[in-house]
Image (cartoon, grey):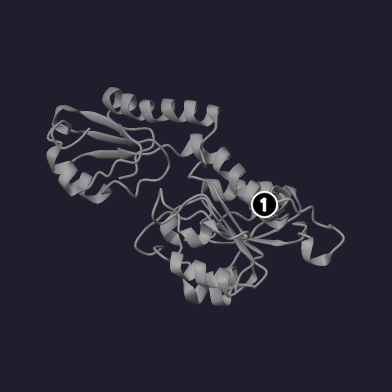
Amino acid sequence: MGLDHIAAYDGVIVAKMIFDKQMIDAAKNLKIISTYGVGFDHVDTEYAKEKGIVVSNCPESVLRPTAELALTMILASARRLRYYDHTLREGVFLNADEYDNQGYSIESKTLGILGMGRIGQQVARFAKALGMKIIYHNRHQLDEKLEAKYVDFADLIKNADFLSLHAPLTDETYHIINADAFKQMKDTAFLINVARGSLVDSDALISALKNDEIAGAALDVFENEPHPRQELVEMDNVIMTPHVGSATHVARYNLSKEAANNVLSFFKDGKAINQIN
């Protein structure tokens, strides 16, 4: 679907297609854009609102699988699965009795969560069940029932053994994890990103990893998808997956229904279920 065809539609469901000002101007009859996922940084939501176009997203379907992937990455980083897998495939059967070949237990470690929305909260619940301490930074302090400690951004990055990113990509959060942030992190800390690639300055991340400013990273998202930086590809302390946070059979089935129901609800009741603008 391109500029020549968009004018024919009253509603669209979009996954990764960029809906910028040019595309929106070409959509003469468009009334709703339903994004196939929770993220919507590929849609100019403010301009859509100016043009009277509703934008909706799908927060429910991606919640648990994305949180599961974040937890998987925490465990895989702690237990050095990327390194063990690589060395074994190269024909080296490591001696687990040697200190340098050992990983970490996550019990009593501190998980720092940046962005305590639904996914961040689910990650906190998972991690709490495994004995981790939870600190978080968010635009607003949340209910104490989560058993997580609210801290400012500086304390978050300074004290986290694992820093898991779950913030939306905005002008304020673009490259929020930069060279200065890495310098404040523990040199034993791991960065986990299943949110948006541009939350992290890729150059700063590569530098931090090369200079042992942090212990490692686990990334499901990248600044220049679908082409992760070659330096990251070659590092044994970096785990990478191809933006698969919601890639389970059940999640994708539910995601399709949720995206469609936003459109159906809009045309039936005049309001999308998960309207964001």
Residue 187 placement: quadrant: bottom right
Residue 21: x and y in percent read 18, 48
Residue 258 placement: quadrant: top left
Residue 202: x and y in percent read 45, 64
Farthest residue to the front: give it. 91
- Vertical comparison of 251 with 243: above or below: above
Q: Residue at x 53, y 40 (%)?
A: 63
Residue type, mark 1 in image: His
Quarter of the image with the C terminus in it: top left
Q: Nearer the viewer, residue 183 or 11?
A: 183
Residue 24: x and y in percent read 18, 42
Left or right of 235? Residue 178 is left
> Looking at the image, can residue 111 be seen?
yes
- Vertical comparison of 67 with 144: above or below: above
Q: Residue at x 48, y 74 (%)?
A: 179
- Vertical comparison of 82 with 251: above or below: below
Residue 190: x and y in percent read 62, 62
Q: Which residue is mark 1?
A: 86
Left or right of 85? Residue 5 is left
Q: Residue at x 52, y 60 (%)?
A: 232
Q: Nearer the viewer, residue 206 or 273?
A: 206
